[in-house]
Amino acid sequence: MLRTKRLLVTVLIVGAGIGSAVGLTSHAATTTKDPQTFITTLKSPVKSVANQYKLYPSVMMAQAALESAWGTSQLTTEANNYFGIKGSYNGQSVTMKTAEYNADGELYYTNAAFRKYPTAKASMTDNAKLLRGGTSYNPTIYSGTWRENAATYSDAANALTNTYATAPTYGSSLIAIIEQYSLDGLDNASAASSSSSASSSSSSTPTPAPVVYATATYHGATGNQTARFSSKHSSYRLYNHIKGTREKVTKTAWSKVNAYTGQQVYLDMRGVKKDPNTGKKTTWYRLRFSTSKSAKKYWVYSKALTLPTVKYASGKATVKLSSTATGSYYNHVYNSPYLAKAQGEVSKLTAKSYTADNQATKTQDGIATTWYRIKVGDKKYWVAAATQKVSPDFDYVTYSKASGTKKLGKKYAKYHPYNHVKKTHFDQKTLKWPSKAKVGTKVTINQQAFKPTYQTTWYRIQFSGDKTNYWVDAKALQ
C-alpha cells in the first residue's frame, strides 16, 4: 500500500476547503452535510473499528469528516471512500481527478484510481489497517497514532502530519474538529466498553503485535572518507536514519539531490543493522555530498555505493617507522569498507619498529596502496606504507631467469623450503619437503634469486609430476 502524499484530495476536488470541513465559517454549515448527522451515522462503525485496532475513535471520526467533507465528497458518495485511499478494494475502484504535491512542494492535478468500498465500515477498517500496517518501505510510519504510543488524541492527530498527509496544518485541523464537536467522548466510551465487548467479540481480528525495530551498531569515522554511487543506486533510497530502526524514518528522492552514477560522496559513519526476526545483518553508511561538516547527512544501504576493495594477507614482518613518518594510525585501513577512525599520530609512536601480522592492499579508483597491521602494546593498529616512510624489514633480493636440473644434496633436510625467498615477502610460509624428496632426487629449476647483503643464492624448484614451487637455499642442492 502506498503512503498517501496529498492534501485533502477529495476536499479539493469538490471545492470545499479546510475551513468548511472544520466548520469555521457560517458558509461551511450550508455547504456540508450536517456534522451531527454525520457523527451519529458513523459513530458505531468508527468506535467498533478504532477499538479493535487500538486507535483513537475521535481521530478516526475527525479524519473521516475532513477527508470526505462531512460525507459530501464525490469519492465518498460514489465509493464509500472516507479517507481518500488510492488503489482498488477487492478489485473495485473509481477514477477521479486529484491534487498532488511533487517533491518540490508544487501542486498539480492528475487522474488516479481510488478504492471503492461496499460499506462505510469497510472504509474505516481499511484505513485502520493502513495505520497499523504502514507501508512496504516503512511498516511503522503511522505508529505515532497507536494508542500505546500516543498519550492523547492530540498526539495521535499530530502524528498524521507529514506522514499521512503533507499539509503542515493537518493535525491541527483534526484537533479543531475533535474539540468543536466533543469527539473525545468517543474515546472515553471506547475505553470503558473495551473489556465488556471483548468477550462478545471472539471473532474480531486480534490486536497486531507491537512493532519490534531492528537494532543497529554504529562505527564513527575520521576525515572525509569517500565512495561513489554504484550503477544500481537508484534501486535504493536515502533516509534520515537507518531504515527500520525507529519510527518516522523518512526518505529523500534521488532527483532532489541530483545524484548520478559514479558521483563521489563523503562518508562519516558505518552502521550494521540486525533484523529482529531473522538476525540477518546489513551494512549502511552515512554520507554527505560535500566535505562541509554542516552539509545534510543521509543514510544509504551499502549496495548503493561502490567502495574501495581491500585484500588482506596474514603473515609476519618487522615494520620500521621512519623518523619523518607523518599521519595517523587507525583501527581499520583508512577508506576501506569498514571505514577507519584515527587512534593517534604515527610520530608519537616511540618504538623504531613494530611486529606486523597482517598486510592489506587497498585499491581505490585504480590506485593501490599498502597497509600493515602492527602491534602496539596489547593493541593492534593499521599504518600506511605510503612514500616508504613506513616499511617492513625485508631482505633485498634480485631475481633472474634460470633453467636446468639439480639434485637434492646430502644435507638438504637441514634447510627449509619456502613459498618465497626467506625474509622477502610478508606472506612468508615455511613449507614441508614432499614425501618424494630424498638425497639425490632430481628437481627442475625455473628461477634464481640472489641476496647481495648475505651473498647467498636461492633457487625455485619443482619436483617431477608436481607443479608446486619451492624456494630453497642453493646449499640444499648439488
Image (cartoon, helix red, strand yellow):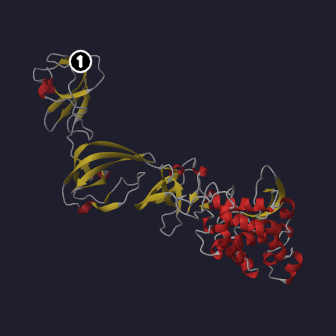
Quadrant assignment, res 52: bottom right
Q: Position of residue 329 (x, y in %)?
A: 30, 58
Quadrant assignment, res 24: bottom right
* 349 and 7: which is toward the camera: 7
* 36 and 98: which is toward the camera: 36
Q: Residue at x 38, y 55 (%)?
A: 334
Q: Is residue 476 left or right of residue 302?
A: left
Amino acid type at circle 1 is Gly
| Number of marks in picture | 1
In the displayed structure, would residue 278 be above or below residue 458?
A: below
* 374 and 258: which is toward the camera: 374
In the displayed orientation, state which residue is furthest to the right.
30
Q: Taking the image as drawn, is residue 164 in sight?
A: no
Q: Taking the image as drawn, is residue 462 in sight?
A: yes
In the displayed structure, would residue 473 be above or below residue 465?
A: below
Q: Kindly identify which residue carries mark 1.
A: 404
* 172 and 97: which is toward the camera: 172
Q: Position of residue 60 (x, y in %)?
A: 72, 69
Question: For the residue labelled by badge 1, is the local secondary structure a helix, a strand or a loop?
Answer: loop
